[in-house]
Image (cartoon, rainbow, N blue to C red):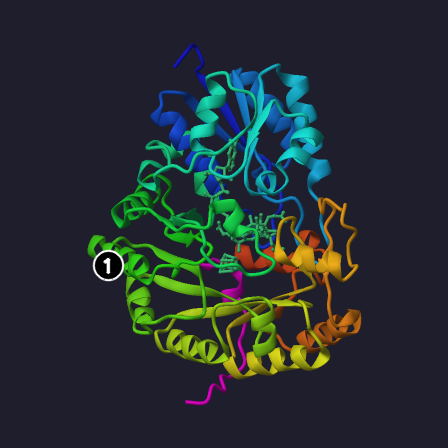
Amino acid sequence: MPGMRGVLLVSANREHFPEPIFPVGTAYVAGELSRRGFEVSVLDVGLSLRPHHALARAIAEQQPELIGLSLRNLDNSAFPCTRHYLEGYRELVATIRRATRAPLFLGGPAFSIYPELLLRALEGDGGVVADGEDAIVRFCCGERGLLAATRPTLDLVGFPARIDAVFPELHRYRTVGIQTARGCPHRCVYCTYPALEGERLRLRSPEAVVDELELVHRRGGQRDFFFVDSSFNASEEHMAAICRALIARSLPVRFSCYLTPKLEDLSLFRLLAEAGCRAVDFGTDSGSAPMLRALRKSFGIDDLRRTSRACREAGIDFCHSLLFGGPGESLATAQETVRCMDELAPKAVIAMTGIRIYPGTALARSAVTAGLVAPEDELLEPRFFFDGEHEVLRAVSALAASRRNWVLPGARDWSSAIGPRLLRLVHRSGPLWTALRPPRATIPS
Ligand code: B12
Ligand code: SF4
């Protein structure tokens, strides 16, 4: 590679709710660079008490020839306690620019949703929408500006072989994220994922996925993993193949994942449990049939019942993630959802009151038609879709307050809350919500 050796990848994410997240995307980009022969190291400023100091020191010590900045979150997507991160990113970029003249390349999910706006706001020398593996190499070879991503064959992507050297603080993450597939063929009205990862499902080989778990377990000692795929059961065969590969390897690891609450083969919950799955986050959104249709979900209320029951019977903890305020939400549909959750009795319910509107989505178009946002609004400043008026959202908050297994990320500023920090100190594996106490299940058999 022409002359370019040292690359410093900086993960800019400083959000600690629900916990500091292992920067998965940065790890795949680092893997690609090290396979191509670059010297690469990663600094996660979110792990540092003095992020600017840590960043300036890393640059002074490593004298990188290029810096990659990973932008995961732009805001916490939660209402009413919305947290914004752009100003913090501006400050990090200012620290970088003071410390070095090395060119700056931007990527990550937040960047991919707002590429032009963030490239301008942060005055980067270039950036890439979505998959960063090929693009960063092209940037290292001299291309500049906003680069079109190529969608790599996923069997060629992977963490760096010496992940503990590239991530010197690997041991500090309770859980490490691993990706088994990219893409989503569904079209839920609010969702950015098909735009971020593509509409076609791209799969990694089960062997490569299990090799990666083993690598992290061997080099970082981690036993807890999160499959970060938007829906681990997007292909049931692929999910089953990964479970079988994990069982065959008998690694002492556990994992959690997102699942769509609809499985053709419900016996797969037993296979998941056997492979080490301890917790499932169902992307449920609503417990009201008209709302599921309005959000264009691919499942119905009976699927929620069937999957919740099968998951419980397999001994796997589960939570349902909900979105209140979508098109057509009323007090009646919101109460129906709360009743449905009472019936399913998941270990936790994680509920957003108001739906973050992202550019290019069907929800953004509905919001313009409904006069909730101006057509020229770029939606960089978070806007939320509320049908059913704020009174519905207040009712949901009140109903949630009387249920000890409900968490509303937007109900308060969790960054200063002591609860999640204490929970993290207690030696527990898996997502923090698994520590909540669920009500008794009332699913009719
Ligand atoms: C899994 C996930 C979670 C899990 C994480 C579990 C874990 N242990 O990893 C949980 C449930 C904990 C979670 C929580 C939150 N999440 Co989340 N999450 C995701 C999800 C589905 C996948 C992220 C991921 O790991 N992808 C896999 C990696 C490989 O992809 P990637 O990061 O995009 O990286 C690729 C490219 O972006 C690029 N790239 C990345 N970095 C870099 C750097 C450079 C230099 C380059 C060139 C390229 C590059 O290359 C990579 C490889 O191709 C995304 C949605 C999505 N599909 O992206 C939302 C997403 C990132 N989350 C989001 C949000 C808002 C949150 C929360 C704030 C929600 C909340 N209020 O609690 C919290 C924040 C947590 C925290 N501390 O940061 C938003 C962020 C957008 C925004 N509005 O800011 C997203 C995009 C979802 C959305 N609404 O559209 N999340
Ligand atoms: S919500 Fe889930 S299933 Fe729907 S489009 Fe997004 S990733 Fe796909």
Residue position marked by numbered label 1 in the rendering: 244
Does residue 443 belong to the magenta stretch?
A: yes
> Can residue 417 be seen in this snapshot?
no
| Rendered position, 13 above or below 421 | above
Q: Is residue 61 left or right of residue 122?
A: left
Give the farthest residue toward the left.
248
Q: Residue furthest front?
A: 369
Q: Is residue 88 magenta?
A: no
249 displayed left or right of 144: left
The residue depicted at 39 percent of the width and 59 percent of the height is 234
The overriding secondary structure of the stretch rendered in magenta is loop
Q: Quadrant of residue 236?
A: bottom left
Q: The magenta stretch spans which residues?
A: 427-445
Q: Is residue 90 visible?
A: yes
The quarter of the picture where the C terminus appears is bottom left
Image location of residue 228, percent across then percent down: 45, 51
Q: Quadrant of residue 324?
A: bottom right
* Residue 5: percent from left, percent from top: 43, 15
Dot 1: few (<14), some (14–19), or many (≥20) neighbours within 10 Å? some
Identify the residue at the far bottom of this view: 444
Secondary element type, mark 1: helix
- Residue at 59% x, 60% y is 189
